[in-house]
């Protein structure tokens, strides 16, 4: 992929996380900045779990391919 493709994909992911964050905070009707930040942290952690699992699976398959 080209650099611009990565930039577009990353911006779409950020926009999606922002929309998820805003809908979660407006639904819960939170008033303080700490509540917003806590919700953002939770959303980012839940988004990072599949990325971490995918990276681990990729590294396992990459290592097994090298051992054969």
Image: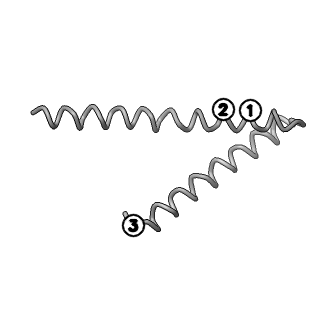
Q: Considering only order in the chain, which callout, 1 or 3, is on the residue closer to the N terminus?
A: 3
Say which quarter of the image contains residue 52. top left
Residue at (67% x, 35% y) in the render: 41
Q: Are marks 2 and 3 in contact (CB under 8 Å)?
A: no
Q: Considering only order in the chain, which callout, 3 or 2, is on the residue closer to the N terminus?
A: 3
The x, y position of residue 7, in whole percent, is 51, 62
Query: For mark 2, what is the residue?
Result: 42
**Depth check, front residue: 7 or 25:** 7
Horizontal side of 39 relative to 26 (left or right) equals left
Mark 3 vs mark 1, CA separation in Å: 34 Å
Residue at (73% x, 35% y) in the render: 39
Q: Are marks 1 and 2 in contact (CB under 8 Å)?
A: yes
Determine whether the residue tagged by mark 3 lies in a helix, strand or loop: loop
Horizontal side of 65 relative to 25 (left or right) equals left
Horizontal side of 14 relative to 39 (left or right) equals left
Determine whether the residue tagged by mark 2 lies in a helix, strand or loop: helix
Residue 2: mark in rendering = 3
Determine whether the residue tagged by mark 1 lies in a helix, strand or loop: helix
Mark 1 vs mark 2, CA separation in Å: 6 Å
Q: Quadrant location of the N terminus?
A: bottom left
5 vs 57: above or below: below
Mark 2 vs mark 3, CA separation in Å: 31 Å
3 vs 29: above or below: below
Query: For mark 1, what is the residue?
Result: 38
The x, y position of residue 5, in whole percent, is 45, 65
The number of callouts visible is: 3
């Amino acid at each position: 992929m080209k650099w611009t493709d990565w930039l577009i994909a990353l911006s779409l992911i950020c926009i999606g996380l922002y929309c998820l964050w805003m809908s979660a905070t407006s639904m819960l009707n939170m008033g303080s900045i700490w509540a917003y930040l806590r919700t953002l942290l939770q959303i980012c952690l839940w988004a990072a779990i599949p990325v971490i699992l995918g990276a681990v699976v990729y590294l396992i398959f990459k290592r097994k391919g090298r051992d054969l």
